[in-house]
Amino acid sequence: MTAPGAHRQRGNAREERIPFSGSLGIAQANQIYGAIAAEHAAASRLIVDLEGVTQLGRVAEAAIVAACRVRVRRGDFIHIVGAQGLVSDIELALGTPEQDFEEAPPRLLEAVGLGTLTKVASAAALLQMAASSSAAALRFAFRRVHLPRHSLRYNIALMGADAVGIVGLLAALLGMILAFEATRQLGDLGAKALVPDVVGLSLIREFAPLMCAVVVIARNGAAIASELASMRAGQEVDALRTMGIDPVEYLVLPRALSLILTTPMLTIMAMAIGLLGAILVAILFAHLDLALFYYRLVEAVDLNDLVFGLSKSLVFATTTSLSAAAVGLSSGSSASDVGRATTHAVVLGIFLLVVCDALFTFFSGVSHGR
Amino acid sequence: MADELGIVQLHALRLGYSPSKVVLDHVDLSIRRGDVVAILGSSGEGKTTLLQAMLGLIAPLSGEVRLLHRSLASLNKEERSQLFARIGVVFQHNALFTDMSVAENLAMVAYQTSQLRKEVVRELVSLRLRSVGLPGFESRRPDQLSGGQRKRVAFARAIMLDPEILFCDEPTAGLDPLTAGKLSLLIQHLGSELGATMVMITHDVDLIHAIATRVVIVGGGEIHVDAPLDALRESSDPLVRGLLGQLIAPRAVS
C-alpha cells in the first residue's frame, strides 16, 4: 500500500514524501491514517503522493483527510499529488472546517437549570392535565361529552378484572404477613387478643389502599403513559386534534374514569382477602378463636376507617391516572421517549402516592387530636 | 469467475407466511456486480418480501439466498456481521434513530462494524453528509429534518462504508416531485461514484429510466419479468405496460 516516506532537506524545511499505490479502501484506512499522521514525523512539508493509486474509496479518502488535518494542526505544509479528481476532492475536504459532533456534557449550573426547568414543566403539565380532565369530567357529568363506550368497557376490564388475580394474591400474602408479625410482637407482651385490632386497622386504613395503588401504578399507570406516548409518536393525538376531538376527553377521560371506578373496588377486595389471610394465620398459628377475631375486629374498625381507606384509593387512582396521562401526552416522539415516559410515569406515580398518603395521615392525625 | 455467478443469488426460493400462504414461488434470480436492478410489482405482490428475503430478514420456506457468494443460512453471527458490513440498505421509512443526532446515526455503523479510528470516522461522517448535500447537519436530530433530508441521511448511512451492494426500498416514495427528482440525481451520482450494485424497489419511472439496467417485475406469485430495461420498451405485456407507463412506446394502432 505505501512505501516508507523519503525525507530530504530542502532549504530550511524538511520534506517528506509518502507515496501510496494500488486500490485503497476500508481495509487500509487505519494504516493510511497512521502513515500520514505518525507522531515521529518531523517534516514541515509533506507530500502525499497518490500517483500510483488506482482506486480510492471514500473511507480511505476520509482517513487521508483526517490525518492531513493532524499534520496541518502541527504546522506542516501539505501538498497532495495525483489524479486531478482525487486531489481536488481531498483538498476540498481539507478546506472544510472540521466538525466535532460529540456533544460536551452540560456544565453543573446548566444541568441544574435544565433539571429545574424540566421539573417545572412536568408540574405544569400535571396541573394542566388535572384542570382539563376535571373540565372534561364535568362535561361528561352534564352529558355534553360522548365517551367511546367500547373504550370505557375495555379499560374497566383491563384495569379492574385483569388485576383481580394479582391483587388477590398479594392481599392474601399481605394479610398473612401482618398477622404473623402482629402475633409475634403482641404475643411477647401477652396481648395476642389485639392481633385483629392491629391487622384490621393497618389493612383497612393503610396497607390495602397502598398495595392496590402500587399495583395500579405498575400495571395501569405505566400502560397509560406508554400508550399515550406511542400515540403521540404515531401522530394519533395530532390526528384527533385535527378532527376537532379533544384528546383529553377521548383518550384520558375513559382511562381515568376506569381507574377511578376500579381501584376502590380492587381495594375493597384486597381488604376482604387480606383479612381472610390474617384470619387463617390467627387461627392456625396464633390459636385465636374465630368469634373472638370477629368481635375484636368489629370493635376496632368502624365505618370511618373504611371510608378513610376508600377515600385514599380514590385519590391514588386519580393522581395515578392524571400523572400518567400528563407524562404520556407530553412525551417526545422517539422510541426511547416512550420508554422514558413509562419510567417517569411510574416514578411520579409512586412519588405522588407517598405524598398523598403522608397528607392523609397528617390531616387524620390532626383531626383525631382535636 | 465468482462474480459471473452473481453477487445476489436466489435459488428456487419459496417465500410466505406458511406453506399454505405462499407469497412468491419458484424465484430464481442472479444479480451480477454492477447491475442496477429495479424491482416492480403491484401492491401486495411480494416486492418487500423479496427484498427482506435477500437481506435475510425473513427465512424462506424453501430455497437458498446467496449474498456476496455466501449462503445466508450457513452463516454464524460473526460471519453474518462481517457480510452485512459490506452492504448498505435504505429502508422505506428511513429507520433513523430519532434519539441520536444525524452524525451519531452515521457513526454507529462504522463503530459497530469496523475498527476504524475515531478521527477517520468523524471525517467520514462529514464527507458523507457533504456528498448527500447536507453539510453541517451533524448535530441535528432526524425529527428536525424534512422528509427529503431524512432520506438523504438514510442514504448517507447506507453508503457510509463503501458498500458493495446497495439495497433501497422505495427511495423516492412520499416525496414531492422536485425533491424526488433531486434524490434521483443523487442516487444516480452515488451509484456511479460507488460503482456499487444496486437493488431497489421503486415505481419511480424517472428513476428507473435514469439508472436501472435491469427490471424485475413481480406478479402472480412469481417473477413475472426479468429483463434488461431496453428489452422492455417495446413490450406488449399489460403488466409491464401498466407499471412502466410512459417509458414504453405507445402501441401502434392497427
Image: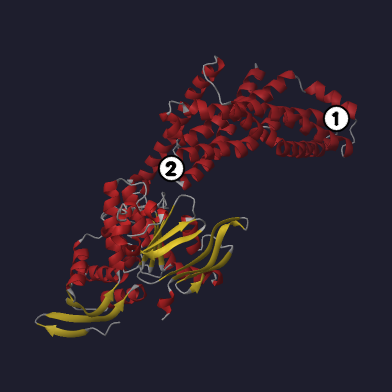
Q: Quadrant of residue A274?
A: top right
Residue A326 placement (x, y as % from top left):
49, 32
Q: Chain of mark 2?
A: A
Residue A177 placement (x, y as % from top left):
77, 39
Residues under labels 1 and 2: Cα distance? 58 Å
Residue appearing at x 33%, y 74% in the figure: A25
* CA neighbours of label 2 inside 10 A, class few (<14), some (14 to 19), many (20+): some
Give the labeled residue for mark 1.
A193
Nearest-to-viewer mark from 1 and 2: 2
Q: Is residue A147 above or below residue A154?
A: above
Q: Secondary structure at mark 2?
A: loop
Residue appearing at x 56%, y 26% in the figure: A148
Q: Is residue A147 above or below residue A118?
A: above
Q: Earlier in the sequence, mark 1 or mark 2?
A: 1
Q: Quadrant of residue A215?
A: top right
Give the labeled residue for mark 2.
A333
Q: Nearer the viewer, residue A299 or A208?
A: A208
Does the image show residue B115?
yes
Q: Quadrant of residue A83?
A: bottom left
Residue A351 placement (x, y as % from top left):
55, 35
Q: Chain of mark 1?
A: A
